[in-house]
Amino acid sequence: MVQFFIDRPVFAWVIAIVIMIVGALSIKSMPVSQYPAIAPPAISIDAFYPGASAKTVENTVTQIVEQKMTGLDNLLYFSSSSDSSGRGSVTLFFAPGTDADIAWAKVQNKLELAKPLLPQIVQQMGIRVSKATKNFFMIVSIYSEDGSMNNYDLTDYMASNVESILSRVPGVGEVMTFGSQYAMRIWLNPEKLLNYSLTPADVKRALQTYNVQVSAGQLGGLPAVKGQNLNVTVNVHDLLQTPEQFEDIPVVIKPDGSTVRLRDVARAELGTESYEAESRYNGKPSGGLLIRLASGANALDTSKAVKAKMEELSKYFPSGLKVVYPYETTPFVSVAIKEVVITLFEAILLVFLVMFLFLGSFRATLIPTIAVPVVLLGTFFILKMFGFSINMLTMFAMVLAIGLLVDDAIVVIENVERIMHEEGLSPKEATRKSMRQITGALIGIGLVLAAVFGPMAFFSGSTGIIYRQFSVTIVAAMLLSVLVALILTPALCATMLKPVAKGHEAAESGFFLTRPFLLWFDRVFYRLRDRYFAMTAGVLAKGARYLIIYLLIVGATGALLLKLPTSFLPDEDQGVLFAQVMLPEGATAERTARVLEDVKNHFLVQQKEAVESVMYVYGFSFSGRGQNNGMAFVKLKDWDLRNRPDLKVTAIVGKAMAEFSRRRDAIVFAFAPPPVLELGNATGFDFELQDRGGLGHDKLLEARNQLLGMAAQNPALMAVRPNGLNDLPEYNVNVDWQRAGALGVPVNEIHDAISSAWGGTYVNDFVNQGRIKRVYLQADSSSRMQIEDLNRWHVRNSGGAMVPFSAFSTGKWGYGSPSLQRYNAFPAIEIWGEPKPGKSSGEAMQAMEEIAHKLPPGIGFE
């Protein structure tokens, strides 16, 4: 084969050009990311139960969904969360390599078995099944520069006009709005209801009766009588649209013709579906969308597509509306890949210079230099065939491969030049003889290197995904370099090298260096080589002594290796950081907003040299949802503007923690995102503490507190904290069913009254700005602020008399969790932590496991 290409160099060039073309085309179509898709594919199921507590959501939604998720292929584990906001979520994680589309379809089929068992209101609100990763990919936010739109206006605009469009962008897995769209809020007044002997159920029935879309058919519809000349649609009643129309609804029409309308017992206003979360961008009201990346999606392409779509939508924005991106992960990916590409070209240049320096011939140096792009581009084609991406690992492997892949070409060139020097043959004949001598050696070199790096491609788990891409890149480059050394390099040697007289060196006057310099370099090099030979001879003469020294060096290396801290991947300054705020149990959103405003001021004022913007949300955090929780997304300035050590993310976090640690009204954590966001939201480790023995929530909390106390004293651990909300005060209403029965009060009336008045009820829909939105019935805020307000509400008994709640119910205070978690169907509490400086992640996890083994029986961990 080699002789064939020596005689036909044009054919060798054609093959090389074809390899480069398919490689270049592969680069254009390959996804670009910081790291490969390390996280396992995940499918998320989200449901909403208005007004329900976390315990109610867990018992009636999440557990039922969990129980039906059996028999799914490649399912690794699943987790769920239930919030006092009424939201329930179950996330299923599948083995790496699982087709996310097939997993989504199977989960959807399993969910159909669970739907009939879920509360009717949950089914009405809709259950969403989506393919999504765990990470926060980017946040798209809008704010009004002229202040003409408030927070509710902005969130409604985002939910109504942007959310559904962005959710259809390729690569977007899940879109979540900080806030919600407009809703028609019917605020009930208990005193006015009592005056007219009405209950919330009466108002609800009136809304269901009068706010309807009636299908009346057609005038002259088929089949029509002969001679009919007119066909028109008949409309009787449409959905209502304005608060005034709702307030005009008759609740009761008495026999004497007098009417009690909705405005007599309640007020209607255009509000929002949920008042749980609000966002601010640099202190200004804003609407925000959190985007999660779809499993296996291209981060850079998705980011570009989202921004392009927002640029298109911005042409139709109301006046004064501006789009910002307060949090995004792709700039760091772009910078990281750019730096690796620069390193790649630097490596090629250095290899060229070193080869020229040692070979002493520009022609001889040019031959392996030509082989470099052929091999690298061919490697991209192979990576494309394997479904890999252009990422830090594949590019790093190529940087390392450059120094290895030129070895095959150099071996060919040096042997050809040796034969010309020793035997005086022409370049073509010398190449023929050279390839007969070294073809086997070239193949052997490639196979040995493949045997060294190849086994890493078969590692399992997330580590396997990392090393597989690295391994395949190295092996592909090595095998291609052998192929090029057998096809292209001999053809180049036969056509490009100059004949050399027998006994003469092949060095020529350099294009970059002069002949005298090359001769001086050769003399120095040969002198160093001779000294090395002499030193080697001395070592061999005293082999035992140097063998002991070698063993001591190996032992010292091993000891240092064991002492060095280890981690999954190195932490990087990604240009963003998080700040999480937790206030005491029972704190209101107003207090949380004040703390977040202080957090914003710290970053924008005290660290303004490093920080570009701050967007914060109260009512939402990584720990869960609640009025006493908040989250700030801090975007840092470009890396070129933060070239001092005190402007790096680690220093910024340190200053922030020093400032926030002095607060007594709240706990504030500032932390940088981990290298791989798909595996978690913070650096360090996640530890799931589970109630496997059915001990109950209180015992699980006791075990958590015991674990945290022991972790605080462990020398391998730091910043060990629960990722969840503490139990909050709860008021439990106990209904005396026997007393209620004696008073003639139907049980369903009691349930409906308390659920509608305090929890809020989704009734039906209305039309707003051409879109269908929801109508909610709830007590006005002034009538549900105090425990005593419960007695202001009445229900009607079978005799038509109004009975206060105090006549058949009592209450007492207790504690309950606003956010409940489950892991693999067991009640769980997630623990975050980090290894202390100088300790490895493995040592930290081992310490956590040793502590967990000391916990009471029935408490497990994963």
Image (cartoon, helix red, strand yellow):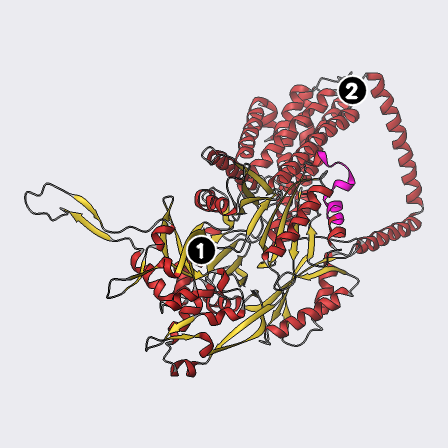
Amino acid on which disc 1 is placed: Arg
Above or below, 442 against 48 in this view is above
Q: Residue furthest left?
A: 226
Q: Residues within 10 Å of mark 1 (few under 14, many from 20)?
A: few
Q: Is residue 490 above or below residue 189?
A: above
Horizontal and vertical percent position of residue 508: 77, 17
**Secondary element at image label 2:** loop
Relative image position of residue 712 (x, y in whole percent): 76, 64
**Image quadrant where residue 621 sits:** bottom right
- Residue closest to the eye, 372 or 627: 627
In depth, the one of 804 and 843 nearer the eye is 804
- Percent position (x, y) of residue 742? 39, 83
Query: Which of the two discs, 2 and 1, sits closer to the camera?
Result: 1
Nearer to us in this view, 621 or 292: 621
Q: Which residue is mark 2?
A: 507
- Number of other residues with Cα within 10 Å of mark 2, as a class: few under 14, some 14 to 19, many 20 or more: some
Q: Is residue 413 left or right of residue 133?
A: right
Q: Is residue 11 part of the magenta span, yes or no? A: no
Left or right: residue 348 versus residue 822 is right
Please say whether residue 243 is visible from this viewpoint: yes
Range covered by the magenta-colored residues? 641-655
What residue sits right under mark 1 in the picture? 128
Query: How far apart are labels 2 and 1 at the CA level?
Result: 72 Å
Q: Position of residue 265 (x, y in %)?
A: 39, 61
Query: Disc 1 on helix, strand or loop?
Result: strand
Depth check: 343 or 152 in front?
152
The question of residue 652 being in magenta is answered with yes
Residue at 45% of width from left, 74% of height from top? 805
Q: Would residue 572 be visible to someone looking at this image?
A: no
